[in-house]
Amino acid sequence: MLLKRSLPKIRWQYWVKPWQHIDWLLFILPVGVSFFGGLMILSTELKQPVTDWWWHWLVAGIGTLIALFICRFRYENLLQWHWVTYAITNFSLIAVMIAGTSAKGAQRWINIAGFNVQPSEFAKVGVIITLAALLHKNTAATLPNFCRALAFTALPWLLVFVQPDLATSLVFGSIVLGMLYWANANPGWLILLVSPVIAAILFGTSWPLSEPLVVFHEIALGPLGILWSIAMGILAWFTLPWRRFGMAGIGAGAINMIGGELGIFAWNHILRDYQKARLTTFLRPDQDILGAGYHQHQSRIAIGAGEMWGWGLFKGPMTQLNFVPEQHTDFIFSAVGEEFGFIGCLVVLFIFCLICWRLLHVAQTAKDNFGSLLAIGVLSMIVFQLIVNVGMTVGLAPVAGIPLPWMSYGRSAMLTNFMALGIVESVANFRQRQKYY
């Protein structure tokens, strides 16, 4: 009798044992967000002859199985294969340039068995694994290790940037910054790393003058850009080791001056008209509400129309009448705002905060630096995409084409997010058991 009573328990433990130590809250929340995202996509397509909501749920189901499969195996095995992962990542990005399909002015997809696959999405996971492998022993506390990590991530970043895929290249940047910071990089070095980009923006700013100071043809010196370059020179003097003859300060100031001029050159000769329109429309939202600013303007109206409690599921007039273009992808959050109101938006953001909190907890309780860096890389990726996507739907960020994790429609992005989740769950599954949570 006792033997019979014990058998079901033994079978249950046998089947559940491979996953018994994973973070179930971290796993369940993204699955729930994916299901809710499918409902929102269905709401945006009720009066359209498309069925993306069905594909969203199907891919989310496949992604869930992939995550469960990945977290069964020890994440330490990725260390043995990180150079192979790095090679596959770069090879896939090069393959897009050679044999990829183009859409909307960019060549980002490869057609495999009738499905368009976006390698730049999967490259995010590849970069996270590569950086974690490089930094888990040789941390970024020293400048050679810091530069070594940057050198290896520069190639995939460049391959994504030239597709062109500016949005994904920005996600790469957020991953690198987050992981370098977690690997004990000097915060001053991180500021210096992004300083040329800020200089490129400030050099084209005329404030407080009416126009930037034009020195020769297209060489302009914005007052804010000059002050920024001087500040970066001072920061480099205090944080970089090359202090003799002021080489660190002079070099940092010169790099920012060059970055500012390159920014002006890129604006005039490299950036395409639609990219310029996105930036200028963000700064002046009412400048072209029927053209470049139409998406963002309609999104803000839809969110505002939801007021406190929203119109209800499948009842939002802006959503049902398809007033918000690309609402099922980049602007899915506007459907939440219209149909579930301010309270619904807060609930969604709270759930994402819980996901980020659990990712941070796994990073803090991982048994080694490699697992901790993997979790931080995924956290950096999710946080940046969340902030930019929600920001652009409410008019606080330019339209960058960055999807909302697990909610926006996108098969490659969905699988990438679940693969990343599976890796983090592997870190949680094989960490030392914690007594307190």
Image: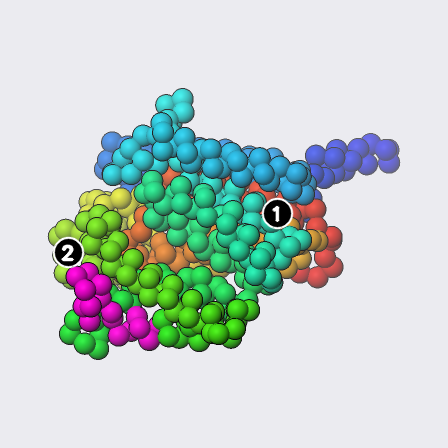
Residue 213, by quadrant, is bottom left
- Span shown in magenta: 213-228
The x, y position of residue 368, in whole percent, is 69, 53
Is 244 or 404 nearer to us in this picture? 244
Q: Are marks 2 and 1 in contact (CB under 8 Å)?
A: no
Rendering coords of residue 198 (x, y %): 35, 64
Numbered circle sitting on residue 376: none
Q: Which of marks 2 and 1 is in front?
A: 1
In the displayed structure, does residue 90 sit left or right of residue 205?
right
Q: Spatial distance from mark 2 to mark 1, Cα to Cα?
A: 47 Å
Q: Position of residue 39 (x, y in %)?
A: 37, 43
Q: Earlier in the sequence, mark 2 or mark 1?
A: 1
User: Is 330 part of what is drawn in magenta?
Assistant: no
Residue projecting furthest to the front: 245
For numbered disc 2, what is the local secondary structure? loop
Q: Farthest residue in the right direction?
A: 2
> Which three-letter amino acid code belongs to the residue tagged 1?
Ala
* Residue beneath the point at 17% across and 61% down: 217
Residue 417: tell me if it is visible. no
Q: How crowded is mark 2: few (under 14 residues within 10 Å), some or many (20 or more)?
A: some
What residue occupies the far top of the structure in this picture? Answer: 113
Residue under pointer 2: 289
- Residue type beneath disc 2: Ile
Front one among 231 and 243: 243
Regarding mark 1 in the picture, which secondary structure is present there?
Answer: helix
Q: Name the residue under label 1.
A: 133
> Mark 1, residues whose alpha carbon is within 10 Å: few (<14), some, or many (≥20)?
many
* Residue 416 shows in the view: yes
In-front residue for pair 433/167: 167
Residue closest to the eye, 93 or 253: 253
